[in-house]
Amino acid sequence: MPAGTTTENIKQLLKRFKYKRVLNSNPQFKVISLLGLIDGKDAILTVEKTHFMFEDNIKSQQQRDSGESTTKAHLKMGSPPPLFYHCESEYSCVQGLEEIKQITANDIYYWGVGIIKQDLDRNPTARVNLIWPANYVHIKRFEQQNLHFVTETPKMYLDIVKPFIDEQCSGDNLQWVYKILYEGSDADRVVYKDDADKEKGFLILPDTRWDGVNIESMYLVALAYRDDIKSLRDLKPIHRDWLIELNRKIRSIIPACYNYMVHADELRIFIHYQPSYYHFHLHIINIRFPAGNEGLTVGKAVLLEDAIETLAHLGPQGYMERSISYSISDTHELWRNGLEAANLEEFDKAGIPRQPEIRNADGD
Amino acid sequence: MPAGTTTENIKQLLKRFKYKRVLNSNPQFKVISLLGLIDGKDAILTVEKTHFMFEDNIKSQQQRDSGESTTKAHLKMGSPPPLFYHCESEYSCVQGLEEIKQITANDIYYWGVGIIKQDLDRNPTARVNLIWPANYVHIKRFEQQNLHFVTETPKMYLDIVKPFIDEQCSGDNLQWVYKILYEGSDADRVVYKDDADKEKGFLILPDTRWDGVNIESMYLVALAYRDDIKSLRDLKPIHRDWLIELNRKIRSIIPACYNYMVHADELRIFIHYQPSYYHFHLHIINIRFPAGNEGLTVGKAVLLEDAIETLAHLGPQGYMERSISYSISDTHELWRNGLEAANLEEFDKAGIPRQPEIRNADGD
């Protein structure tokens, strides 16, 4: 499939991008997703403004450029408190403000707008992500969604969710995961790799939503080598020791990798349910990573430590023995293919009345 | 006080801004707040990236410039579907991308960075806000808290947290809760009251952070009448039936109270640990409530349904039998009075190395 090979370059592709419609726009996060066509095939373009530049991040960049490994650089530098280096660069939030215009002022409050110094290498203003060719599932994932709250019983899992997961794990759906694990795809981005033992091994790399620069928004993903755990549901007490060891390793390795700009007790490690792909992985973020992401929210994220503790109080079948509550989009295939109906049934059983029929609604 | 008059201009003021330190930095919202000095007086500078330009926004800007109020302009124009006007301007998110550089590509996924076309009048990249002279209260309001991740064992609870809770529940600290429950304080705001049975009764009222208007950001609090449950820690399997009934009532009552603009399966109901006050209460929010609030985050919020399920798998002492993981600010009294030390000990026990001693830090 030549359209999907990586011989194409995002720059060339975007020149041929024909705009169709906005899929989503988030003024709080300064991110917009557009649907368009490239060579007659659907393309999803996501553009997001970058955060302001900090001096300490520029330093780590220079270390990397000068060929030193992060760990070596770390050993040499000790652990500088990062906050004191902010705003000394020509691109920093103070020096980088090239022009300012006042909009209004009142008492001690002043408001204005400004333009900033940009540089494609040293201070880009936008992060750009393109999916091409994009299919229906990709498009749905980017589109604005209505969320519902569902309490998934073991029966609902077996009847509805498990068949979906089996389907998601078939074919080439997880090809990109195996490419990273076994074929060295993204090798230059891998932060840590421990593949000596397939049962216990894992690999850590930055999540694509992280710019890789700002330590405060650090977002990493740990991919397990084992492929027998599709989701939280498959976790059993026999996995506890492995999870404890994973937790220990991650909290030991990551601070060292990032020059102790983030500490062991400043990591939030969690599992998504439902995840976006069914191969066991952990999300690792800086605890300062601002809330404001549905992925961090209770009812989507389950803390690794909480899973470890929960498993200590469950029987041998682990999470299969309990219900799991979470929020899910009504665009999710699971919702449309059974979860909505099953959830309604559960609400009925619990004695929670359905919404009365609307007869004379004002809307359409 | 001439320094605070509006005869000063933000542009001139910022030329004299001497940077002191970063108060807060939010990479997701792309906003940073700095403390500095202007003419020897404290100044708080907040800079935020703007959202991507839409054609419809430019239109509204022109309307404003021509002296029409937004409402009048809106009425005149009808309500144009904004989405179709996106990306037609030279500053739009597609046309406005001046240069693009690919960072990496994998299969159908492409990532890059770009710089955008800026114009101080038509497409500024930053919004700037200055408070000067700023006082201690302003500064505190902007300052970032450092969060830490802690796994509280039952022993840590008994040694450190319980004494703190006992102290928090003594004296007049909870007077405001009892005033609401028994003395009709905030009576006009109460949405639902069920006080026939002190053991089972509860009362629902809007949280002060909700404007009471926008249903998407609906935020309610349910206060229990019983006062024997100080926190999540006190929940035991004997409370399960009561919690199930609470859940049923809330999911039945609230949609009806708000004219079914929010449905039973669109409520996120949760408990905070640590809560801000130690009298059992539930947070009830619209599931659409924008993430972006630390209070919704895993490691702070525990879903009511999850607590109900967790209790089904615990012994008679309930949550007292397990560890609870959460994030806590280093400004929290608990952190300073024992939790930090106990947490370090737990990390030592788990074999997670502490940060190495800093010897030759570059900073001060």
Image: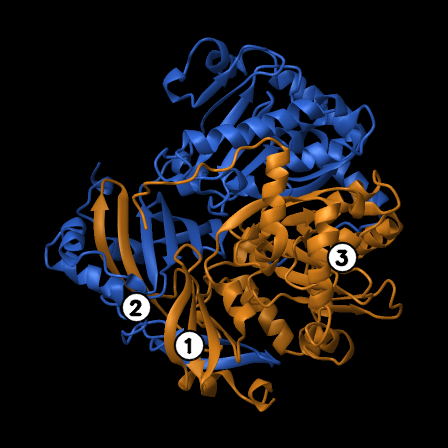
Chain colours: A orange, B blue
In this rendering, the answer to whether B32 lies above or below B295 is below
Q: Nearer the viewer, residue B272 or A39?
A: A39
- Dot 1 falls on a residue whose secondary structure is strand
- Left or right: B167 in relation to B283: right
- Left or right: A299 in relation to B284: right
Q: Position of residue B46 (x, y in %)?
A: 38, 51
Disc 3 marks a residue whose amino acid type is: Ile
- Residue on which the image places disc 1: A36
Q: Quadrant of residue A335?
A: bottom right
Q: Nearer the viewer, residue A59 or A297?
A: A297
Marks 3 and 1 sit apart, C-alpha to C-alpha, by 39 Å
Tag shown at residue B131? none
- Residue on which the image places disc 2: B84
Residue at 80% x, 24% y: name it. B317
Residue at 51% x, 12% y: name it. B178
In this rendering, the answer to whether B265 lies above or below A20 is above
Q: Earlier in the sequence, mark 3 or mark 1?
A: 1
Q: Quadrant of residue A150?
A: top right
Q: Pointer 1 indicates a residue of which chain?
A: A
